[in-house]
């Protein structure tokens, strides 16, 4: 049993490019609408539909909020004008080889009388080419139709003619048509516009079919190039089957065959080809086991090796520049990974990401045979792997870390595992109205709170992590908090009634009256936001989550100072701070005033204190009594004078 897979089976450059454009737009979170199915493969179209991609048949049907993608087949110039006039945002994924034909017919419409197109007039690519012709134009499907055309319009032979072909036109038929045109039309400019991908596929399929007992052509039944491959293979191998998926495998015929050839249309995804090969392996395995042959596995693996089934390659870094990395992917083309495809971090530098000799997993984005290059992406592979990690983190509610790379409208974007995660401003953990750019380039921890597979969109919350940490700290605090316990805290905010102090993840409040022994009007007279201060717990209420803190110290209590330094009998200088009919109030130390009764002011008889004293005046007075309970102090100038006289 031999299975041979055609090397060129699967996506061509143009289809791969169009599919990548759609995938990239989806990865960026854009809404996408395609003008007609993006490729002629119902399975891939369904996959995109599941990711929210819509299909519009005309520009008028397109969703105005989506980016309209023009598929690889291209469109008539009138349709593009319509798209522009409707103000739709669009991406043109027309294959460059098709654009080349548009340009040829556009230019030759000016210098030739007639344009001849070899192709299927109902095919969108041919419709698109027709829409770029401004002179007389005719379409023929094969050499017979060309004969009919030249018979019906004999003047064509005399006119200047430009001939082009649909990119997927049958090579053999093209050769037949050309020999007729060359013979009959004396003034013909012929452009062989059959795509190289098509001709290579067709030649390979033809050779493979002629060497195989059974030929499988995998692809959509509406795909023009798949049907052509089928016809070519059928002409060489009677047992040729066109299948769209593994479900359609002709199992009994496969079991009877000794050599099986496999090819696939240019719009057949690698995943479908791989699935067909795997299913076929299971069927063959049964047969081989029945027949006692055991080496079928090696045989199948060998056949799979010939085909790179998922557009992934390994590459060794061989060169690094600031804008791109060159890799050896074991092919004749040079592999290029632009910086933008190396990492999702727009601030990243190539030299920080890779070094010479590193082996990278890469996805082929496009091959350019003319330039001999393959455009590759590491970012897409990382993003695919990373997406799984992000989804897992969301499901399992685990904290992930990422670097904030962008400030966008309404929040920031953090890159984690190569995936961009949007963190809305309200979930950044910063206060409302705060400058979120402070997070730029910072490593942040967050929970992934939402993922949308279709749009590959993930939303994160830093606040949820911070809240959880605060909760843990609060639990730890309440577990051993007690009145009198001291903490070193940071003043977080001030209000007219006190200062809020962070004492290690939990906030307590120092009431204004607890900030100072002196009378103050605002806490800012004692502390400022950001100050580190020593506090102690004055009272706790776990139910209400209230922590009252003390700041002023007992040793600074003026009554303590008075007790220690100003006992009864002390003569000291005091300042008159108030006068009444019955006496004068005098300040001994800050916050401690005593009363000098009118009878204690002078040895002489005085009518009222104002006769001999005035506010602000400093006098010597003796402390004659202290009532600590009632906070009353009696002073006497008379007694102070007597003491002075006695001392003298
Ligand atoms: S078959 Fe050729 S022309 Fe058509 S999309 Fe593919 S690469 Fe482009």
Image (tube, grey):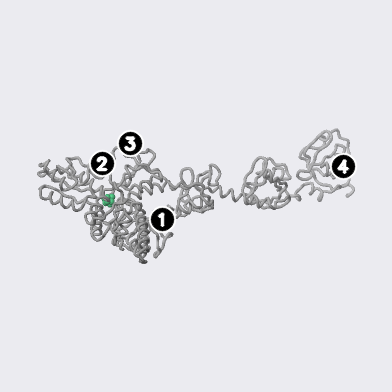
| Residue 67 seen anywhere in this rendered image of the structure | no
- CA separation in Å, label 3 and label 4: 107 Å
Q: Which residue is outermost to the front?
A: 290
Image location of residue 499, percent across then percent down? 66, 44
Instruction: Return the disc, 3 or 2, that comes first in the chain's sequence.
Output: 3
Q: Quadrant of residue 525?
A: top right
Crowd class of label 2 (few under 14; some 14 to 19; many from 20; radius 10 Å): some
Left or right of residue 414, residue 44 in this image: left
Q: Earlier in the sequence, mark 3 or mark 1?
A: 3
Q: Give the image location of residue 468, x and y in percent.
A: 59, 49
Q: Earlier in the sequence, mark 1 or mark 4?
A: 1
Position of 296 with respect to 591 (left or right) is: left
CA distance for labels 1 and 4: 97 Å
Query: Around disc 1, counting alpha carbons within 10 Å, would you say few (fewer than 14), some (14 to 19), or many (20 or more)?
Result: some
Q: Nearer the viewer, residue 610 or 128?
A: 128
Secondary structure beneath disc 1?
helix
- Give the residue number, with chain letter if any, for mark 4: 638
Query: Residue sitting at 21 percent across and 54 percent down?
Result: 235
Q: Mark 1 against mark 4, which lies toward the viewer?
A: 1
Identified at 15% across, 44% down, the residue is 112
Kindly state the secondary structure of the residue where label 4 is placed: helix
Callout 4 crowding tier (Cα within 10 Å): few <14, some 14–19, many ≥20: some
Front position in the image: 220 or 187: 220
Marks 3 & 1, CB-CB < 8 Å contact: no
Residue at (66, 40) in percent of width and height: 496
Distance from the alpha carbon under mark 3 to that under mark 1: 36 Å
Residue 381 numbered mark, or none: 1
Residue at the disc numbered 2: 76
Q: Residue 60: which numbered mark, if any? A: 3
């Amino acid at each position: 049993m031999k299975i041979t897979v055609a090397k060129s089976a699967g996506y061509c450059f143009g289809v791969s490019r169009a599919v990548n454009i759609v995938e990239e737009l989806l990865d960026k979170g854009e809404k996408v609408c395609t003008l007609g199915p993006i490729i002629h493969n119902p399975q891939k179209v369904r996959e995109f539909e599941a990711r929210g991609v819509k299909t519009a048949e005309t520009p008028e049907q397109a969703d105005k909020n989506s980016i309209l993608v023009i598929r690889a087949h291209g469109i008539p110039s009138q349709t593009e004008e319509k798209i522009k006039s409707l103000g739709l945002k669009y991406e043109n994924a027309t294959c460059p080889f098709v654009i080349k034909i548009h340009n040829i017919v556009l230019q030759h419409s000016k210098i030739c009388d007639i344009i001849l197109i070899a192709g299927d007039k109902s095919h969108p690519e041919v419709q698109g080419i027709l829409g770029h012709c401004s002179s007389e134009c005719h379409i023929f499907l094969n050499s017979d139709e060309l004969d009919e055309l030249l018979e019906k319009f004999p003047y064509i032979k005399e006119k200047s003619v430009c001939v082009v072909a649909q990119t997927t036109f049958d090579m053999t038929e093209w050769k037949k048509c050309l020999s007729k045109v060359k013979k009959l039309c004396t003034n013909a400019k012929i452009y062989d516009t059959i795509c190289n991908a098509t001709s290579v596929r067709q030649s390979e399929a033809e050779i493979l079919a002629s060497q195989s007992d059974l030929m499988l052509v995998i692809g959509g039944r509406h795909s023009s190039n798949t049907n052509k491959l089928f016809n070519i293979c059928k002409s060489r191998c009677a047992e040729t089957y066109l299948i769209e998926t593994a479900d359609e495998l002709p199992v009994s015929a496969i079991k009877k065959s000794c050599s099986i050839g496999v090819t696939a249309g240019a719009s057949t995804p690698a995943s479908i080809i791989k699935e067909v090969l795997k299913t076929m392996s299971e069927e063959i395995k049964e047969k081989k086991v029945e027949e006692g042959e055991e080496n079928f596995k090696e045989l199948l693996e060998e056949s799979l090796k010939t085909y790179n089934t998922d557009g992934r390659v390994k590459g060794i870094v061989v060169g690094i520049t600031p804008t791109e990395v060159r890799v050896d992917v074991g092919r004749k083309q040079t592999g290029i990974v632009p910086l933008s495809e190396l990492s999702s971090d727009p601030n990243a530098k190539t030299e920080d990401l890779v070094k010479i000799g590193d082996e990278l997993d890469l996805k082929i984005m496009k091959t350019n045979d003319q330039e001999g290059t393959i455009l590759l992406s590491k970012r897409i592979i990382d993003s695919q792997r990373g997406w799984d990690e992000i989804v897992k983190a969301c499901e399992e509610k685990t904290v992930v870390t990422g670097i904030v790379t962008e400030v966008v409208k309404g929040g920031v974007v953090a890159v984690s595992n190569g995936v961009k995660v949007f963190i809305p401003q309200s979930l950044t953990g910063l206060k409302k109205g705060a400058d979120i750019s402070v997070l730029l380039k910072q490593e942040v921890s967050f929970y992934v709170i939402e993922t949308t597979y279709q749009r590959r969109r993930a939303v994160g919350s830093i606040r949820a992590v911070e809240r959880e940490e605060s909760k843990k700290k609060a639990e730890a605090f309440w577990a051993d908090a007690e009145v009198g316990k001291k903490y070193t805290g940071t003043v977080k905010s001030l209000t007219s009634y006190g200062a809020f102090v962070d004492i290690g993840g939990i906030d307590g409040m120092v009431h204004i009256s607890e900030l100072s022994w002196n009378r103050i009007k605002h806490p800012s007279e004692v502390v400022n936001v950001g100050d580190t201060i020593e506090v102690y717990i004055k009272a706790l209420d776990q139910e209400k989550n209230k922590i009252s803190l003390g700041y002023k110290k007992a040793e600074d209590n003026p009554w303590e100072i008075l007790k220690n330094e100003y006992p009864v009998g002390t003569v000291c200088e005091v300042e008159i701070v108030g006068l009444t009919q019955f006496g004068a109030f005098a300040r001994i130390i800050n916050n401690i005033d005593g009363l000098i009764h009118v009878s204690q002011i002078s040895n002489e008889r005085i009518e009222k204190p104002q006769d001999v004293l005035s506010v602000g005046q400093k006098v010597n007075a003796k402390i004659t009594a202290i009532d600590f309970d009632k906070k009353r102090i009696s002073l006497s100038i008379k007694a102070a004078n007597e003491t002075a006289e006695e001392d003298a």
